[in-house]
Structure formats: C-alpha cells, structure tokens
Image (cartoon, coloured by chain):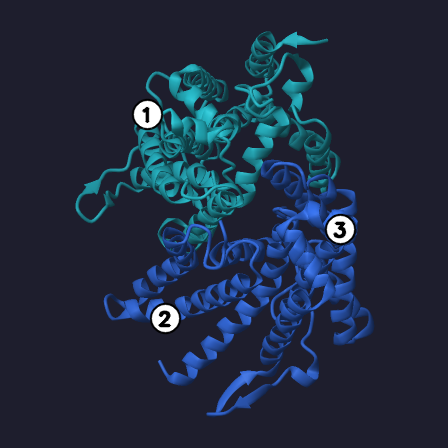
Chain colours: A cyan, B blue
C-alpha cells in the first residue's frame, strides 16, 4: 500500500503517542519510558537531519552537542542538588532544577560549540569534514573522561528529575507528553525552515554550491547557520536524554552515539522531515526486541543497516510512501 | 625531569607514532586509490590482534602469531572487500560511512561471540622481554625498540613497493586516473582487492604488535582508528609520506603532552590540580594540533586539493 508521504508522516508520527497511551492504559510504565527514549533520540536526529539531510554535511560528531546538552543539565542540577554555586571565575551561578532554564543553557552552549566547530570544520568538505567532526567528538569524549570535577569516567547521577512548571515530571506519561510536545514543536519549526528561503538556499548549496555562490549567497554561511541550529537542537535532546536517565556520562560524547544518529536518519529515510523520527522509533524497537533474543543483537542491527544502505536507499519512508524524497 | 626520562618518552612517542603509521598508511592508500572512507579499518586491527593472541596461545610462537595476524587480517580484508566494500566505490561518503559502521557492529560483536568479552593476553617473547641499555645508559624495553625497528622496516618496504615496483606504479596510476589504467589493461578490481588486503594486513600487524603491550579486546580498534584519521587529516589524505609525518607528530604530541603538560602547569598551580588539568588538556592536544594544521593547510601537510 503506497500512501502520500504527508499522510504517512501523520500516521507514523501519531503512532508514538498512541503507544504511550496504550501503555498507560495497560499500566506498563517501562513502555512509556521506551517511547520517551525514542522521542528524545528522534529529536537529536531531527537536529542532525538539518545539517545532514538538507545541508549535505555528514557530521560524525553530533554527539558533542548531545553530550554538551547532557552535561549542561548534569552540572546545573548537581550544583542545585548540593546547594553550591557554580564558580565560573568572573562570576558565580546558582545551580537550578528548572527544565526551561536548563534547556536554555543547553541550547546556548551547544549552539556556541557548533559555531566554533563549524567555523573550523566547514573550511573543509567531504571526507575531511567527516573525520574532523569525528575528531572533535573524541576531543570532548576524552576531555570529560579525564576531567574529574563532574564524575570523570564514572559520570554524574542526578537523584530527582528536574521540574517543569505545571507538570509532575516524575510521572512517566507527563514527562513523555512534555518530550513529545518539544519534538512536535521542533518538527514544526524544521518544516518551516525547510520551506523558508534559507532552507531552499541551503538545499541548493548541497546540490550545487557554485551556482549558489554565483547568485551572491555564501554557501559557507548557509552551512554554518544550519550547523549551529542543528547542534542546538541536538543539544536540547541531550538535556532531555540526561533528564530521562537522571545520569550523564562521557558515553553521551562517544562516536558510536554520533554514528547512531546517522543510522536513525538513514533507517527512516534521508532528507525526509519525519525520517529520523521513524528511524529512532525503529531503532529503539529493534534494540528492545533483539536484545531479548540474543546478547549479540548488534550483529543483527549491523546486518539490517548494511542491507538498507546497499539495497533500500529511501529507508522506511521511502519504501512506504509514493512520490520522491527530497534527496532524489 | 631528567634528560633520560625525556628520551625514554620520546622513544615511546616514536613507537606509538610508528604503530599509528601502519594503520594510517592502509587508510590513506584505500582512500587515495579507491576513494573509500573505511571506518572498519579498526576492526581489521582487532582481527589481527585476536588472531595473534589465539595462535600464540595454541603454538607458543610469537613469530607464528605475527604471521597469523597478517594472514587473518588480509583474508578478512579480501572477504569484506568482495562482499561489501566493492559495492561502495561509486557511492557517496555517507553510504560508505554507514556501511562500514555496520561492518564494525558485525565484526566487533562477532569477535565478542567467538572469544567472549574478557581481554586476551599476548605475551612479549621472552628473548625480548627485558630492557636493553642504549648509548648514554638508558634502559629501554627491548620489545618496544624492536617494534619501532619493525615498523620502520615496514614503512621502508611500503615506500619501495609504492615507489619502485610495477604494482606500485599501478597503485599510483589508480590514484591519478582509474578509467585510464583500466583502459590500459590493468585488472582494476583485482588491484582494488589487493590494495584493500594490503591495508588490512598492515592494520592486522599493528594490532598484533601493540596487542603484546596492551590487552587484546573487542573495541580496541576504534580509538586507534580515530587517531589514524587525525593522522591522515594532518598528513593529507592519500599521501603515504603525509601519513608517516602525521603519525610521528601525533604519537610524539600525545605521549609527550601527557608527561610535559602536568609538569609545566606544576609551576603555576598546586600539584594535584596541575595533574588533573594537565592530563585533561593533554588528552585534547592532538586535536588542537589537527585544528592548527587545518587552519593553515585545509588539505593537510602533504595533501593536494
């Protein structure tokens, strides 16, 4: 059965809250947590998709922003938890347990990091860009491992989930609703960006940078802006992910994490707005089902991924929807 | 800090650099000739180390173990090239990254399934287990000195192979213009398989040689792979000479930074924070080095645009 991509997107998108509501009715909080995890990973990959799908920037270092978002939450909440102000040299900052403030810090910090990394990495293209973003990821990874102040290699535990005005975030379904609301808002925003003149120019810079330059636009600046927005969204996802687990550790910076974000995008269908959402849900589902079957479930994941890359380039949405994707 | 200690650290840096070169040379050859970015190169390093550890445990012979590492990694390279990699040459980099990422998952978990999660140990041969006294009275582990020499010999052999032999001419011609050498009657797909197997064998050898100093375990390849990426970005992708210079720079920076930086900071602050800040910053040094090189030469030291 082939559906128009728009209808398919709506159906696939509503599947996630449907699962959560059914799980609530059946009193299965673990399934709600799985759905929350899928939504957060989807958010991280939606961020990457702007740079990768639309901008054509294969970043193998988006875990940097995910990790920075996570540590923004971890550091602020740990200072709030221990009632010690955060000493930044010039001034001190009180820790906080308030999600909106944490999100703002996470987004700001990761956007700033994306700006610095982008300024350097976007001087190069192709394989160099892939390797440099990968190397920046490792730089943060090793830094957090060898920096003892916030747990080093062992990571940092936050005992109580942070708060959001008007919600009880400790209740799984309320936290899910909050995360899903953020995901929906970001997807709406990304849809707007894709159709905006900026989005069109960015897509053109991917297809033919020379032409974009001849009409007086700078591909470098377009890509830099895309990279910064992309990093900021992934950073926000990092803060949520840390709140879901109430734990941050250097693994959030690991390059496998960056690889997985790309996997989500490609499993779902590259260059499609809802591709990362579908891919992340599929990944969490596979992880949940296969890890029950075998300790070596990553072999099967690898095989599935290999088959998708070699033979099914449109991903799940490409296989189910009629019409052509953005990337064709 | 004594001069003796400094010289010892320089030798350690050299040893790390030479081993990195064995990894980076294969990566850069594969990229230069086939235009392929191969994330699974670290898995070949791991396969070499595991083959060596298994053969050493069965036969007790270190030389046989080294030979096994070469054969196993090259064979794995041939199988992977024929089954997967060859379909990726005319794909974009994203597909190459993903497919080779999938290969890492398969190879790592496959190795875990075969050998278990516990690290294996590969013993240094007894004849090389003691120290040697270098001129100036420096005692240095004989095995490390030998792997520096082995690495240098392999590097020299590789330069001869690329620069002086018929195969080398074909490889260099393949980098320059693959259609043309195919038109001239060179079997290009056999050449590609051979280059991939050569790169794999070098990675496997490095894995076995380093495996005797560190432990042999699943996931040992990826940190080295990423360092090798840094090396070829610094040296210029496709350049063997760049890989050598880059590998030595990265090996020395990484080793010396970890020792010198905490000492240098020790003059500015108290000892414990100097150690923690020093080692945290030292872990980032090679990436800073890479960033600096890229600011001045975006295609690396010996790269062509």
For disc 3, the marked residue is: B184
Q: As drawn, which residue projects farthest toward the left?
A: A90
Residue A287: quadrant of the picture? top right
For the point 46% across and 66% down, the residue is B249
For label 1, the SS is helix
Upstream in sequence: badge 3 or badge 2: 3
For the point 69% across and 74% down, the residue is B123
For the point 35% across and 65% down, the residue is B275
Along the line of sight, the residue nearer the viewer: B175 or B298: B175
For disc 1, the marked residue is: A100
In the image, which disc is placed on residue B260? 2
For label 3, the SS is loop
Quarter containing the N terminus of chain B? bottom left
Q: Can residue A218 be seen in this view?
A: yes
Along the line of sight, the residue nearer the viewer: B139 or B203: B203
Task: Return the x and y of residue A19 as percentages of the image width and height.
Answer: 60, 16
């Amino acid at each position: 059965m082939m559906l128009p991509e728009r209808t398919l997107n709506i159906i696939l998108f509503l599947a996630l809250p449907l699962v959560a509501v059914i799980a609530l009715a059946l009193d299965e909080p673990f399934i709600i947590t799985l759905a929350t995890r899928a939504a957060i990973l989807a958010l991280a990959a939606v961020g990457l998709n702007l740079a990768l799908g639309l901008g054509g920037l294969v970043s193998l270092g988006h875990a940097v922003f995910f990790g920075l978002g996570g540590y923004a939450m971890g550091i602020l909440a740990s200072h709030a938890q221990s009632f010690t102000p955060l000493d930044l040299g010039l001034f001190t900052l009180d820790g906080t347990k308030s999600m909106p403030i944490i999100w703002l810090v996470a987004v700001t910090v990761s956007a700033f990091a994306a700006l610095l990394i982008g300024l350097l990495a976007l001087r190069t293209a192709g394989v160099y860009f892939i390797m440099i973003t990968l190397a920046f990821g490792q730089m943060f990874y090793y830094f957090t491992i060898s920096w003892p102040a916030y747990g080093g290699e062992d990571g940092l535990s936050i005992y109580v989930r942070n708060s959001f005005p008007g919600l009880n975030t400790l209740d799984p379904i309320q936290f899910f609703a909050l995360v899903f609301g953020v995901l929906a808002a970001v997807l709406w925003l990304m849809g707007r960006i894709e159709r905006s003149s900026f989005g069109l120019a960015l897509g053109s810079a991917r297809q033919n940078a020379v032409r974009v330059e001849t009409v007086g636009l700078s591909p470098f600046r377009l890509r830099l802006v895309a990279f910064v927005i992309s990093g900021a969204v992934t950073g926000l996802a990092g803060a949520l992910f840390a709140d879901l687990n109430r734990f941050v550790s250097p693994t959030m910076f690991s390059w496998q994490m960056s690889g997985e974000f790309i996997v989500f995008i490609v499993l779902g269908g590259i260059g499609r707005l809802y591709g990362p959402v579908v891919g992340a849900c599929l990944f969490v589902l596979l992880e949940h089902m296969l890890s029950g079957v075998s300790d070596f479930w990553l072999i099967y994941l690898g095989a599935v991924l290999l088959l998708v890359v070699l033979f099914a380039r449109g991903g799940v949405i490409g296989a189910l929807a009629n019409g052509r994707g953005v990337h064709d | 800090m004594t001069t003796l200690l400094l010289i010892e650290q320089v030798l350690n840096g050299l040893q790390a650099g030479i081993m990195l070169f064995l990894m980076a040379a294969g990566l850069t050859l594969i990229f230069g000739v086939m235009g392929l970015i191969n994330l699974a190169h670290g898995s070949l390093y791991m396969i070499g180390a595991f083959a060596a550890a298994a053969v050493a445990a069965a036969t007790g012979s270190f030389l046989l173990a080294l030979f096994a590492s070469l054969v196993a990694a090259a064979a794995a390279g041939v199988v992977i090239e024929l089954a997967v990699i060859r379909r990726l040459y005319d794909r974009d980099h994203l597909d190459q990254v993903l497919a080779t990422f999938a290969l890492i998952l398969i190879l790592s978990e496959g190795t875990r399934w075969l050998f278990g999660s516990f690290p294996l140990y590969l013993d240094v041969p007894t004849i090389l287990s003691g120290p040697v006294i270098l001129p100036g009275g420096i005692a240095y582990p004989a095995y490390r000195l030998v792997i520096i020499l082995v690495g240098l010999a392999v590097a020299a052999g590789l330069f001869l192979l690329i620069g002086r032999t018929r195969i080398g001419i074909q490889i260099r011609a393949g980098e320059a213009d693959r259609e043309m050498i195919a038109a001239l009657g060179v079997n290009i797909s056999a050449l590609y398989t051979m280059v991939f197997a050569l790169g794999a064998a070098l990675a496997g050898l490095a894995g076995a040689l380093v495996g005797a100093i560190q432990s042999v375990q699943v996931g040992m390849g990826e940190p080295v792979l990423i360092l090798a990426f840094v090396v070829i970005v610094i040296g210029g992708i496709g350049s063997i000479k760049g890989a050598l210079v880059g590998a030595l720079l990265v090996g020395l920076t990484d080793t010396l930074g970890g020792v010198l930086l905490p000492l240098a900071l020790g003059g500015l602050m108290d000892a414990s924070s100097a150690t923690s800040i020093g080692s945290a910053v030292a872990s980032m040094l090679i990436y800073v080095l890479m960033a600096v090189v890229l600011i001045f030469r975006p295609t690396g030291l010996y790269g062509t645009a």
